[in-house]
Image (cartoon, helix red, strand yellow):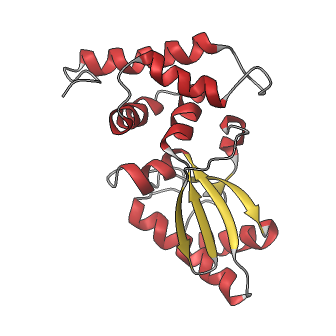
Amino acid sequence: MSDDERTLSREQLVALLREVGLILQEQSLEASIYVVGGAAMAMVFDSRRVTKDVDAAIRSHHEEFHKAVTIVAERNGLAPDWVNSSAGAFMPNHLDDAADEMNLPGLRIAIASPEHLIAMKLRAMRRRDLDDLETLFRSCGIETPEHAAAIHDRLFGETDIGYSGPDEALYAARMVFDRAASRGWPIGTA
């Protein structure tokens, strides 16, 4: 399997990040990252979810963290960018006070809260986000597209780069609700 096709489970993600942390710990360092996207979904909401990479904001010890990630990539046959900041454009500027935390030796991991994931995934709205959004809506008790869009609009506003207005988030949320209903399991029903 090529690097581009390899998927990582929750267990694999945690093991790889633990390996990164141990390399940092050997240097008497503790890095801090904020994980979003598919990796956050796999780590917190759906243990069966797999992802190709870890989208993260590196909050401390950037250079040392990236060196450790490169070492782990080489040891495990991963793409060099298996941890990357590609999702940065979709991250709100607001601090995520409700982020879950995971502490590994040498590495503190903040995992995006459900509301931040909803906002980011509504903003990105790629086909692969539909299942994640459905999982998040059900997990968070979101019963209407308007409720989901309001979360997005609270975290993203006119001053954010790429902001396209509240109608886009509402349209995206309606797509998720309509898709769930067409599959026979409407959101907001028991």
Residue 55: % across, % down: 61, 50
Q: Residue at x 56, y 64 (%)?
A: 78
Q: Residue at x 25, y 15 (%)?
A: 182
Residue 87: % across, % down: 66, 42
Observer-nearest residue: 135 or 126?
135
Observer-nearest residue: 26 or 76?
26
Q: Residue at x 26, y 17 (%)?
A: 181
Residue 124: % across, % down: 59, 29
Q: Residue at x 44, y 58 (%)?
A: 8
Question: Split into 4 quadrants, where in the image is the N terminus?
Answer: bottom left
Residue 91: % across, % down: 67, 39
Above or below, comparing residue 46 to residue 116 in the picture: below
Q: Is residue 171 left or right of residue 140?
A: right
Looking at the image, can residue 70 be seen?
A: no
Observer-nearest residue: 103 or 124?
103
Above or below, comparing residue 123 to residue 91 in the picture: above
Question: Split into 4 quadrants, where in the image is the C terminus?
Answer: top left
Above or below, comparing residue 156 to residue 145 in the picture: below
Above or below, comparing residue 5 to residue 168 in the picture: below
Looking at the image, can residue 95 be seen?
A: yes
Q: Is residue 188 left or right of residue 70?
A: left
Numbered circles on residues, count: 0
